[in-house]
Image (cartoon, coloured by chain):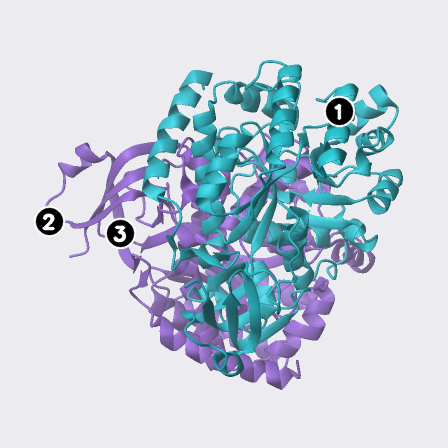
Chain colours: A purple, B cyan
Amino acid sequence: MSDLFIDSKFIVSGFTCNKVIKQGGILIENNEIVAVGKVEDVKKLVSGHDKLERKNHIAIPSLVNSHTHIPETLLRGICDNEKLMTWLNDYIWPFERQMTSEDAYYGTLLGCLELIESGTSGFIDQYFYAESIEKAAKEAKIRALICPSVFDNTPESGSLENTWRHVSNLLNNKFQNKNELVNFGIGPHAPYTVPEDYIYRVKDLALKNSLPIHIHLNETKREVEEALENFGMSPIEYVHKLGLTEGKILAAHCVDTSNKDWKIMKETDFTVLHNPQSNLKMTSGIAPIHSYLDLGIKVTVGTDGNASNNDLGMLEEISTAAMLQKYKSNNPKVLENSQALQLGTVNGMKALGVNSNGISNNSIADITILSLERSHSWPQNNILSNIIYSSSSSDVTDLIINGKIVYENKKHKTLNKERILEQCSKISERIITGMGK
Amino acid sequence: MSDLFIDSKFIVSGFTCNKVIKQGGILIENNEIVAVGKVEDVKKLVSGHDKLERKNHIAIPSLVNSHTHIPETLLRGICDNEKLMTWLNDYIWPFERQMTSEDAYYGTLLGCLELIESGTSGFIDQYFYAESIEKAAKEAKIRALICPSVFDNTPESGSLENTWRHVSNLLNNKFQNKNELVNFGIGPHAPYTVPEDYIYRVKDLALKNSLPIHIHLNETKREVEEALENFGMSPIEYVHKLGLTEGKILAAHCVDTSNKDWKIMKETDFTVLHNPQSNLKMTSGIAPIHSYLDLGIKVTVGTDGNASNNDLGMLEEISTAAMLQKYKSNNPKVLENSQALQLGTVNGMKALGVNSNGISNNSIADITILSLERSHSWPQNNILSNIIYSSSSSDVTDLIINGKIVYENKKHKTLNKERILEQCSKISERIITGMGK
């Protein structure tokens, strides 16, 4: 029996996340929402459904974390005070050279624990060890779009050519075996780490297999300046010139962009994966997503890897996103509450390749439930405002992914938390010792 | 029996919050820490102390929220999308005209619930209804520095002269009756709301009674421009010229400051109360606190009122402060972890007028305990980093203020939460209806 009836004090309903139903009910059959409305109306349709009574709670569409490097969870806190290139050269890349595929599997399980605890039903990843990430995500029963990295410094293979063979074999093969929750894309790291001929190969493979292309673009001023020197154009213009934008682009960061870039972002299938906390912390800047949204460019929110952020909490990330856009645009009206919530939920689902209309009839049943127990959720004058600016990831009590409960009353239903924490502590200690840190 | 022995997995020790003791113990007698160190050493000193076993936890010095308008907690979420002056004129001031002293008492109790749940042992407030705030803070057994507002638009009295009489009587009187936890200062709202002759009266009263002066200064560019027009100088220069800086200045915001201001801030008894989230959300800007710290100017962190932030969580606020300073200075090395924690804890205690050395021998026993239960606290490579960037207010399990447990295992020991939430919901609804919102 997997059909479910949820009885909740508040429901944030509708595709644009702007409708709040008080004393609401949601009926789920298989993986679909079949009814949503006032609890007394929905109740009449219940026949043998399991019941989830959440009378001091809010149900919202599930959060989606649209940019992660999930095994990096093992590296949380290792380096807080460096710019991107030092952070990569002196910390992340040496770390990655110590990592085994089993480590990556456990690191992903730890990341999945955190994603689930913070109410996140899916993530878009770019990393090595795709098979380890796949295995862990399937155990967690979480949505994942896994985009194996193509990168000139891949630790798992020793050379770019080896990486390419591995990734292209994997994707030609996996594409035949995608499942309901876990899917694949391709992850050319960035124009400054992937030579031109490999960008062409990525393009061909992506177009052949309809793979989304998950890439870092225009993350820092320095990156853009170097691209102007090396290619005579910005990273976005460069990948456009090479034809990569014929595919579906999932572009992390896009902090430092020009009008020319904006034109490309608008006219191609281009989604910005915005990572406000990571961009602040590494002094990369603030992406002008209010302008992107005005132009009709697709925007989602992610946290980036735990080595830079240092957590995967999406409620905190959309709150930061909203506050920063008000500051950056000098206009407190931008990114109002329902829009901020939409960026972190339904927009992320679309980037994942799942057509969601939030908590609406006939939409996919991915739902996050937040407790109203903490005083920061009172009074309840403005539910959306409380969600964005007062609630925290720790308020999440339940998570439903594709109609199944994976987290219930703060208990994991798919993963053995104690075993994962223990294993990850050992691995992390071993790797850090190996790095001489 | 109030003496206490705490056994904790980690203790953040020392005045500069930079020492992490693994498997630590703390011994408290009366309101003082009498021993701190490895648990096996401290254990030997235990004789009949109550025990708090927190073996999967971190003990840190208690957080202090250095700028609040605590009864505004009733107004959480009422207005997220306006600039300071519209927000004041169209929302906050009309709201305040509906508020009674009993409402302010309940609003303060709600704020105290939230402060306690988020591990905050004290707050520095500026608002009307000082007696209501005093009553609530004493019930909560929380530290408070209550600074009654002097303001040309005070709802409780009808005129500035009436307000002045009320506030000056109160402070002449209260000064004789201050208690161990609750103390008083004076709160001239800002140079743009308090006429010159009243600034002089504030100064005389403050100097006579050694009252700290809690004031809003240089919050926005517009405020500074208007001051340049009206006074021929910045708000900080103006209050300095009037001699207010002969007293102890607790200055909220200081976002838009010049070298001339910096000289005054450095040469007088001046503490900046930094409110990064409120300043972003109302597009006021980012105060250059890394420069203030470089100059040796005292800095603390606060949340501002719940009507602008919209929560009182200090762990999130210091995380935002640290990320923003890295971004603003374009230097990821500024505000490293122990310094960020110090701003939100011991520096706040000093602004409150309490001489704290954090978790150290002979220091005052104000301690916050965080659970490591959530996955975002693993692995534990860098405890300080996890506290600043991964943990959340909701991880707080226990709070000790002045040697007494006020929050134990997420249960309030001083306040009746259910009754306060119920009462505040009613009041908030009544006021918002009265405002026609």
| Residue B121 rendering spot, x and y as whole percentages | 53, 51
| Residue B87 rendering spot, x and y as whole percentages | 59, 25
Give the distance between the C-alpha atoms of the residues marked 1 and 2, in whole angstroms: 73 Å
Give me the chain letter of mark 2.
Answer: A
Foreground residue among A263 and B197: B197
User: Against A382, is B156 above or below?
Assistant: above
User: Against B95, is A109 above or below?
Assistant: below
* Image-quadrant location for residue B53: bottom left
- For the point 37% across and 71% down, the residue is A417
Give the distance between the C-alpha atoms of the residues marked 1 and 3, in whole angstroms: 69 Å
Quadrant (top left/top right/bottom left/bottom right) for the N terminus of chain A: bottom left
> Residue B268 has which mark?
none
Which-is-in-front pick, marks 1 and 3? Answer: 1
- For the point 69% across and 53% down, the residue is A218
Disc 1 target residue: B201
Using the rendered image of the protein, determine whether residue A250 is visible from the camera's viewpoint: no
Instruction: Give the side of residue B305 with respect to residue B187, left or right.
Output: left
Give the distance between the C-alpha atoms of the residues marked 3 and 2, in whole angstroms: 16 Å
Foreground residue among A26 and A387: A387
Disc 2 target residue: A48
Per the image, label 2 sits on a secondary structure element best described as loop
Give me the chain letter of mark 3.
Answer: A
Using the rendered image of the protein, determine whether residue A227 is visible from the camera's viewpoint: yes
Which-is-in-front pick, marks 3 and 2? Answer: 2
Per the image, label 3 sits on a secondary structure element best described as loop
Closer to the chain start, of discs 3 and 2, is 3
> Residue A31 has which mark?
3
